[in-house]
Image (cartoon, helix red, strand yellow):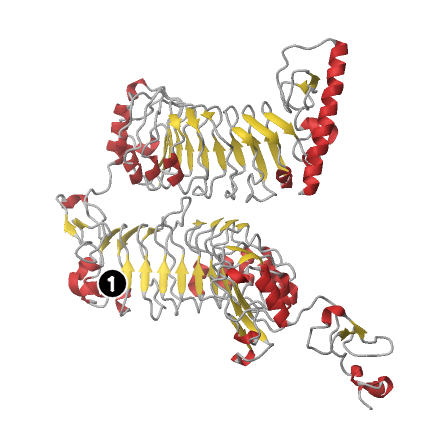
């Protein structure tokens, strides 16, 4: 009776120690000022001492809610679920101590790749002892992080390959150690909320998403992080020097992003780093440059992947000198030169790919390391490491009978170790001379220094970096003829601008232009893009106002690096492809002034497409409700659909965009939702003129199809649709007034219907 300061005696029961089941108080026990009160939400909760009255279900009830919400009846494996068996024996459920006969104490739920469909109920976060949740590989599962703050014990979440709209709320998982969010099509900049988990986060998996922008310098705050996987996103960034502060980091994977600049020396002092991967194989854009730092204080490093960049100079003599057990080194396809250092001979079982550089010497002692190159050195000797000068193979070394070094007919053309071809380095001067002759160079408006002994980098329209041709800009220069496909043999060519010249063009051999990113052939006599699909490095393509005819060339959908495509003013006919999803980085699409028919694609799988020009075509049907469904609402969006045959009401769903310029004049539009008429950021005139600033209503028209500060919507009896621009036969003032009253009434009825439909939705 003396317990709880005598309150047990005063109250007369155990509630003075803990509130009984089904009740609660602010302190979790009874006092005169804070009595235990009944709570219907707690009737099924088998716990004492509750201090909140909330909808907290028993663990079994929570699992039942999960089962019902996610179509448990149709799961691939639902053994035990919603039966009388103990919940700890249900498929995918693990409880404390692993006892399958327990009815509480859930610590892990693993329902990966199990056919879950629906929205993950927030009740799952209320499981009091849940430490691990794995729902990976359920593409029809929607996961939101609302209520995550209730998951006090949660340490591991695997949300890969589900529908995860954003990372908003992730910071509420205050004990989170491991997060898998791979393959979720997440976009936007690096989630700042993750920095609030710096005291706990140990592993972060963000590969195969669409994150963009820079890698923040705050990354150095994640000092407990041991693994960071960001493979194949769209980060455009240098490697922050602050990475060097992450001394617990074991794995750093930034490959297949647009990582540029130099390899920071701070990476040389990471005592636990085992894997460093910043290679480039398929992603276009600027790459790592400069020279290699020593990286000589990485004792745990096992794997190094820096291939496919533009790193120059020699490999330092002490490169990786502090590594105790390096297993793989990948430096192929850079611009490295000189002799390969002898220091690698200390490693016992090494796989080292250095092909496609310009190495002049390799230590002979390497050829005695029979365990190197997965044992191929025992069979092929030195050639297993790199083909010797005067020989070549498609991989730059001998690996087996199918990939073996062969002597070249002209050894003098192949002076380096590790050549991929017997063709040798191209003769840039000869290629340009042929280009000049093919395109009637003597008739060019400007041809300063062409076909002279002056350095080719000084020829008019040529730009170089480090002596390598990176740009040819000869637009509007009176070029005539058909250029030879050898122009694509220039190995470092990135920009080719031949616009506004009366030339034809062939895309034969474009696969050889592995660095070509920007191609302008607008206002030329190009009549086909056949073969362009092999130019997989292309980022910007402009073939506007040429002689291209026929259906949309679906070969363009192979250009997975494409960000802008301009094909305006051609003769492209029939329907557009149903999906442009393969062009996942596309930002701008211009197909205006063609003869396209059929329905407008919804572009619902495009995450970056924010500039669309499809005006002056023959597109029909309604604007899809899912139009640009995956595009972030805070993007600045410009969509021109004017002068088509589109019908129906502008979908209210697109009013989610903060800043959108939507042009739909001269269609057959029947209504504009009021929510769009209130978007002041869309057009500056909206605040003053309302819906008229979006489209002139039926019975009115002007040259812009909408009211601007320069032109009001004028009475026009023949204007049957929103956004009319032409008015051929104005009526008398009395007739005009009568028509205007009738049109206004019609407009009010349509507006009311649109508003009602919006409310119902």
Decide which of 261, 18 is in the foreground and name it. 18
Where's the C terminus, which quadrant?
A: top right
**Residue 422 visible in this rendered orientation of the protein:** yes
Q: Report x, y in % for residue 550.
A: 38, 26
Identify the residue at horizontal 31%, vertical 34% (top origin).
Answer: 531
Decide which of 38, 144 is in the foreground and name it. 38
Identify the residue at horizontal 72%, vertical 21% (top origin).
Answer: 743
**Residue 174 visible in this rendered orientation of the protein:** no
Report the number of discs. Answer: 1
Residue behind mark 1 = 373
Instruction: Identify the image quadrant of residue 561.
Output: top left
| Residue extending farthest top | 732
Q: Report x, y in % for residue 591.
A: 47, 29
- SS at circle 1: helix
Identify the residue at horizontal 44%, vertical 69% (top origin).
Answer: 271
Q: Is residue 429 left or right of residue 745?
A: left
Where's the N terminus, which quadrant?
A: bottom right
Q: Is residue 645 left or right of residue 505?
A: right
């Amino acid at each position: 009776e003396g317990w709880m300061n005598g309150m047990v005696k005063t109250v007369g029961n155990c509630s003075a120690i803990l509130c009984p089941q089904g009740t609660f108080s602010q302190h979790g026990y009874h006092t005169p000022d804070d009595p235990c009160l009944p709570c219907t939400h707690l009737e099924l909760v088998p716990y004492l001492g509750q201090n909140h009255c909330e909808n907290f279900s028993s663990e079994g009830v929570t699992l039942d809610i999960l089962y019902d919400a996610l179509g448990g009846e149709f799961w691939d494996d639902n053994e035990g679920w919603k039966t009388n068996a103990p919940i700890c024996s249900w498929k995918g459920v693990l409880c404390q101590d692993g006892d399958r006969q327990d009815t509480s104490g859930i610590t892990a739920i693993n329902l990966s790749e199990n056919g879950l469909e629906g929205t993950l109920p927030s009740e799952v976060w209320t499981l009091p002892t849940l430490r691990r949740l794995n729902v990976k590989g359920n593409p029809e599962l929607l996961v939101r992080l609302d209520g995550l703050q209730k998951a006090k014990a949660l340490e591991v979440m695997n949300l890969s390959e589900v529908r995860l709209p954003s990372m908003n709320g992730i910071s509420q998982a205050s004990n989170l150690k491991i997060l898998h969010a791979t393959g979720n099509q997440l976009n936007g900049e690096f989630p700042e909320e993750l920095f609030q988990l710096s005291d706990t986060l140990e592993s972060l998996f963000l590969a195969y998403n669409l994150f963009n922008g820079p890698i923040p310098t705050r990354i150095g705050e994640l000092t407990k992080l041991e693994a960071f996987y960001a493979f194949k996103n769209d980060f455009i960034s240098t490697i922050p020097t602050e990475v060097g502060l992450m001394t617990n980091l074991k794995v750093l994977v930034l490959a297949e992003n647009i990582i540029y600049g130099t390899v920071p020396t701070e990476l040389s002092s990471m005592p636990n780093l085992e894997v460093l991967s910043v290679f480039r194989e398929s992603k276009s854009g600027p790459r790592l440059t400069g020279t290699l730092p020593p990286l000589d204080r990485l004792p745990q490093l096992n794997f190094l992947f820096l291939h496919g960049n533009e790193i120059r100079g020699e490999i330092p003599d002490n490169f990786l000198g502090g590594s105790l057990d390096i297993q793989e080194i990948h430096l192929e396809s850079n611009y490295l030169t000189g002799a390969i250092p002898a220091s690698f001979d200390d490693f016992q079982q090494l796989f080292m790919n250095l092909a496609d550089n310009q190495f002049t010497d390799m230590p002979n002692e390497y050829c005695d390391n029979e365990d190197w190159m997965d044992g191929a050195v025992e069979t092929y000797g030195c050639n297993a490491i790199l083909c010797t000068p005067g020989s070549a193979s498609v991989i730059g070394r001998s690996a087996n009978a199918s990939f073996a070094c062969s002597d070249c007919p002209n050894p003098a053309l192949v002076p380096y170790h590790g050549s991929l071809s017997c063709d040798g380095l191209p003769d840039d001067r000869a290629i340009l001379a042929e280009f000049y002759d093919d395109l009637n160079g003597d008739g060019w408006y400007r041809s300063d220094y062409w076909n002279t002994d002056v350095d080719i980098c000084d020829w008019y329209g040529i730009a170089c970096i480090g002596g390598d041709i990176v740009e040819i800009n000869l637009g509007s220069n009176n070029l005539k003829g058909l250029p030879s496909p050898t122009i694509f043999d220039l190995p470092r060519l990135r920009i080719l601008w031949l616009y506004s010249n009366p030339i034809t063009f062939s895309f034969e051999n474009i696969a050889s232009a592995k660095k070509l990113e920007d191609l302008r052939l607008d206002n030329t006599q190009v009549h086909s893009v056949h073969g362009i699909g092999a130019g997989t490095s292309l980022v910007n393509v402009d073939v506007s106002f040429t002689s291209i005819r026929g259906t949309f060339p679906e070969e363009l959908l192979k250009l997975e690096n494409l960000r802008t495509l301009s094909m305006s003013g051609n003769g492209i006919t029939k329907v557009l492809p149903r999906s442009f999803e393969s062009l996942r980085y596309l930002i701008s699409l211009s197909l205006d002034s063609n003869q396209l028919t059929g329905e407008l694609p919804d572009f619902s799988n495009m995450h970056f497409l924010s500039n669309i020009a499809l005006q002056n075509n023959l597109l029909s049907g309604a604007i899809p409700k899912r139009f640009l469904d995956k595009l972030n609402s805070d993007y600045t969006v410009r969509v021109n659909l004017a002068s088509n045959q589109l019908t129906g009401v502008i979908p209210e769903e697109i009013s989610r965009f903060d800043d959108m310029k939507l042009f739909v004049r001269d269609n057959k539009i029947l209504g504009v939702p009021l929510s769009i008429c209130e978007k002041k950021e869309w057009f500056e005139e909206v605040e003053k003129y309302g819906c008229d600033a979006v489209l002139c209503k039926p019975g009115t028209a002007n040259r812009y199809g909408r009211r601007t500060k320069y032109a009001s919507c004028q009475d026009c009896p023949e204007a049957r649709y929103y956004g009319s621009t032409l008015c051929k036969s104005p009526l008398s003032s009395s007739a005009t007034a009568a028509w205007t009253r009738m049109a206004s009434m019609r407009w009010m009825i349509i507006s009311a219907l649109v508003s009602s439909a919006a409310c119902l939705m």
